[in-house]
Image (spheres, rainbow, N blue to C red):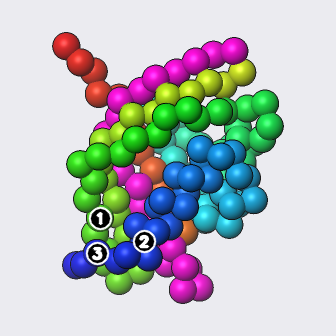
Amino acid sequence: MGTDRTLLHTFNDLKNALISGNTTKLDELIADAYRGFSLNGTVETKSDILECFTPGGVAIHTYAVHDMSCDTYDTVGIITGKGEIEGSFGSHTFHHHVLFTDIFIRLDSQWKYYKSQVTEIISG
């Protein structure tokens, strides 16, 4: 078990691509077999993410991550933590505090975003 700086770099590249809506970079960083599990329990694919981040789609204004942990096991990388994400999707605005688990796999010597699961933190 270890921490791989290239995995953290890939995670940050992914985060920046989501913030900027850079679908070319997202396409590069997300594995074709990606499956994510959203806050409302839906399954998201790579094509779903790319479609959501086209112009006029999701716009992220805040994406802060803390209490992050990063572990690698040969060709698998796992990043967990807490996040705050705020933005809009069309006329709908959102603000979420979440716990997340992101799993990456190493394909052709590069980390690819492979699985993701988020859970809303309910205050109160």
Residue 19 is situated, as x and y percent measured from the top left of the image, at 59, 44
The answer to whether residue 108 is magenta is: yes
Q: What's the residue at 36%, 39% (across, down)?
A: 83
* Residue of label 2: 7
Secondary structure at badge 3 equals: loop
Q: Secondary structure at mark 2?
A: helix
Mark 1 and mark 3 residues within 8 Å of each other at the beta carbon: yes
Q: CA distance from mark 3 to mark 2?
A: 8 Å
Disc 1 to disc 3, C-alpha distance: 6 Å
- Front-lying residue, 89 or 62: 62
Q: Tell me, yes or no, whether the two marked residues, 3 and 2, touch with CB atoms within 8 Å.
A: yes
Q: Which residue is mark 1?
A: 70
Mark before the other along the chain sequence, 1 or 2: 2
Residues at marks 1 and 2 touching, judged by CB atoms closer than 8 Å: yes
* Percent x, y of residue 5: 37, 75
**Dot 3 surroundings within 10 Å: few (below 14), some, or many (20 or more)?**
some
In space, the residues marked 1 and 2 are separated at their CA atoms by 8 Å
For image coordinates 77% across by 41% down, the residue present is: 54
Q: Amino acid at mark 2?
A: Leu
* Quadrant of the image containing the N terminus: bottom left
Does the magenta segment cover residue 94? Answer: yes
- The label shown at residue 3 is 3
Residue ID at (28%, 75%) = 3
Q: Is residue 114 visible?
A: no
| Comes first in the chain, label 1 or label 3 | 3
SS class of the residue under badge 1? strand
Magenta stretch bounds: 91-111
Q: Is residue 88 above or below residue 73?
A: above
Question: Quadrant of residue 51 in the image?
Answer: top right
Which residue appears farthest toward the left when viewing the image? 124
